[in-house]
Image (cartoon, rainbow, N blue to C red):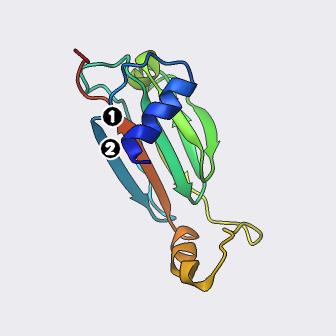
Amino acid sequence: MDLSKLSKTIIKLLGFPDEFMAEAAIVNFYHPSSTLSGHTDHSEYNLSAPLLSISFGLSAIFLIGGRSLEDKPVAILLRSGDTIIMSKESRLCYHGVPKVLLPKNDQHFNYDNELEEPFKSYMQVTRININVRQVNNVV
């Protein structure tokens, strides 16, 4: 299943309108000292369309506030596999990632064979976030 089909499946399961069309994806790579400054997602023409944000690897603290930088943000712990969906008002709220968390000694990925070891090693020191979005209005 490609990323577009996966995104559409998730959106449909959550009850969003079936018109969602994945038109763009951004892949963010984080090392343990990386951050993502507070920003809004306001550039797309259709802000009602959901934006999917899928996390892999290291955990991170995600902050989301309001439309103003003065609004106090709420902290959310994102773990590998977590997905955030933002649409409408939430896309216009400031959000960011101020902290990527180092793994605990007991936190690890399970793999079946030694061929997967390089991937395992990489994911224990990296956070990857893939966000998928619809850019245009569906006609």
Res. 38 in view: no
Indicate the secondary structure of the residue bearing disc 1: loop
Q: Amino acid at mark 1?
A: Ala
Number of on-image labels:
2
Q: Is residue 61 above or below residue 115?
A: above
> Where does residue 55 sit, x and y in percent of width and height?
52, 49
Q: Residue at x 69, y 69 (%)?
A: 108
Q: Quadrant of the C terminus?
A: top left
For mark 2, does the 10 Å Cα neighbourhood hold few (<14), some (14 to 19), or many (20 or more) residues? some
Res. 134 in view: yes
Q: Amino acid at mark 2?
A: Ala
> Where does residue 78 sit, x and y in percent of width and height?
61, 46
Instruction: In this rendered view, identify the residue nearer to me: 11 or 130.
Output: 11
> Where does residue 46 sit, x and y in percent of width and height?
29, 19
| Image disc number at residue 56 | none
Residue located farthest toward the front when viewing the structure as drawn: 1
Determine which residue is flagged by label 1: 22
Q: Residue at x 52, y 33 (%)?
A: 10
Indicate the secondary structure of the residue bearing disc 2: strand
Q: Is residue 73 above or below residue 60?
A: above
For mark 1, does the 10 Å Cα neighbourhood hold few (<14), some (14 to 19), or many (20 or more) residues? many
Labels 1 & 2 near each other (Cβ < 8 A) = yes
Residue located farthest toward the right when viewing the structure as drawn: 106
Instruction: In this rendered view, identify the residue nearer to me: 73 or 2.
Output: 2
Determine which residue is flagged by label 2: 25
Q: Is residue 105 above or below residue 46?
A: below
